[in-house]
Image (tube, grey):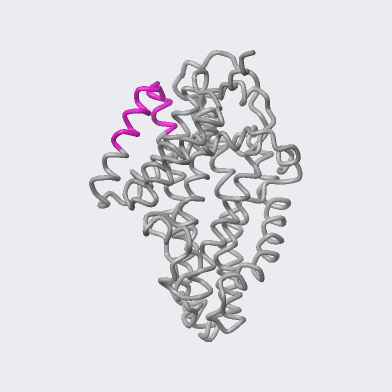
């Protein structure tokens, strides 16, 4: 009697039930836990995964990889199914900027005044206060500090260090859009990009984070483009985990393995039948809110408790407040914004270049876009 063959990624996507929301939430919480070490115990504190991988990868960086792998799948699918530049761009704007804008306003106008040691007049008239809001919203040259805020913390002069990844996320959205418009969002082009990114990551670290992070996003995109051939096998997933562990302990190639092997593991877990986890996001997707609010709340907890404090104390005290802020952000800002994705603003209703659509496919499964 032969064993049933593993389902293809295409079949898994068509099945509509998945653990993507649960994985995204777990990744956001993982970033919070990773940051609890330096934010609670001090700059330079080494967390367990960083020690295990010989400094190659922290838990926070691994969780960013999980986000980007999932994003690579969903964003590539989004363009294939609706190859319309205006609708694609508008959906991405609504996903990123309303939640980001609210968090920055609350940070600048509520948290900053509450924790600065400066007189409020000096705080509000400092150019850095306005620049913090504007630069971080524009995702260009992020500014980490607010005047007089968290300067005595074990990890000083950083109000929200999580924001550094957003410009790369948006950059990959724009790359997908450009390739889509040029009709180059194809297997060969994505594979070429992965080879180039792996080479650049291995040879030099002087190209900012673009090559490394493209390994994760591009890895997800590649798996999606080969979805009719990729089978979700537990044996392949186990082999990928073993390969990743080897690179981790050798001290070389762990980030490349995370992109080229880890993406498969992420998607295997995303479509593994895990019962209730498939309905995890039914009442809301809190992952983005957790990612946005965790760092400033954790800094506030350390300041209020007179840090340094143990990492687990920082995480345990901060988590309920982060969860509350994330739920409020989803309920009152992110969800209402996403409901407007089919109502294009005037600027987005101008005629654009015609793009050949992908052959008709079933409607996308629920989950983050």
Q: Quadrant of residue 349?
A: top right
Q: Residue furthest left?
A: 203
Q: Is residue 193 left or right of residue 177?
A: left
Q: Residue at x 48, y 80 (%)?
A: 148
Residue 323 image position (x, y, % from top left): 69, 59
Q: Is residue 364 above or below residue 51?
A: above
Q: Is residue 113 left or right of residue 173?
A: right
Residue 123 image position (x, y, % from top left): 50, 79
Main secondary structure along the magenta-highlighted residues:
helix
Can residue 194 be found in the magenta stretch? yes
Q: Is residue 42 above or below residue 81?
A: below
Q: Residue at x 60, y 56 (%)?
A: 29
**Quadrant in which the N terminus appears:** top right
Q: Nearer the viewer, residue 305 or 54?
A: 54
Q: Is residue 18 above or below residue 188?
A: below
The mark tally for this picture is 0
Q: Nearer the viewer, residue 363 or 357?
A: 363
Q: Nearer the viewer, residue 15 or 166?
A: 15
Q: Residue at x 60, y 70 (%)?
A: 312
Magenta range: 176-196
Residue 151 image position (x, y, % from top left): 46, 80
Q: Residue furthest front?
A: 1
**Quadrant in which the C terminus appears:** top right
């Amino acid at each position: 009697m032969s064993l049933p063959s593993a389902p293809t990624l295409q079949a898994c996507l068509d099945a509509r039930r998945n653990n993507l929301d649960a994985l995204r939430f777990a990744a956001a919480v993982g970033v919070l836990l990773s940051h609890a070490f330096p934010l609670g115990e001090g700059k330079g504190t080494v967390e367990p995964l960083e020690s295990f991988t010989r400094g190659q990868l922290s838990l926070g960086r691994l969780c960013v990889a999980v986000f980007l792998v999932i994003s690579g799948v969903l964003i590539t699918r989004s363009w294939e199914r609706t190859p319309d530049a205006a609708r694609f761009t508008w959906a991405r704007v609504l996903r990123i900027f309303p939640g980001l804008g609210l968090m920055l306003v609350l940070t600048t106008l509520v948290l900053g005044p509450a924790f600065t040691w400066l007189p409020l007049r000096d705080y509000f008239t400092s150019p850095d206060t306005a620049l913090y809001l504007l630069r971080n919203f524009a995702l260009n040259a992020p500014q980490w500090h607010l005047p007089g805020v968290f300067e005595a913390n074990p990890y000083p002069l950083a109000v929200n260090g999580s924001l550094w990844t957003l410009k790369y996320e948006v950059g990959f959205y724009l790359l997908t859009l450009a390739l889509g418009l040029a009709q180059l969002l194809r297997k060969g082009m994505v594979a070429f990009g992965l080879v180039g990114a792996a080479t650049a990551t291995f040879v030099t670290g002087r190209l900012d984070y673009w090559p490394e992070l493209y390994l994760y996003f591009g890895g997800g995109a590649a798996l999606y483009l080969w979805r009719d051939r990729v089978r979700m096998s537990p044996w392949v997933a186990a082999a990928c985990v073993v390969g990743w562990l080897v690179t981790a302990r050798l001290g070389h190639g762990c980030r490349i393995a995370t992109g080229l092997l880890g993406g498969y593991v992420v998607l295997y877990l995303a479509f593994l039948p895990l019962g209730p986890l498939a309905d995890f996001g039914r009442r809301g997707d809190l992952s983005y809110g957790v990612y946005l609010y965790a760092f400033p709340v954790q800094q506030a907890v350390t300041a209020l408790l007179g840090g340094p404090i143990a990492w687990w104390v920082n995480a345990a005290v901060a988590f309920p407040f982060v969860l509350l802020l994330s739920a409020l952000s989803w309920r009152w800002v992110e969800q209402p914004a996403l409901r407007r994705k089919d109502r294009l603003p005037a600027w987005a209703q101008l005629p654009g270049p015609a793009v050949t659509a992908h052959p008709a496919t079933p409607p996308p499964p629920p989950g983050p876009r």
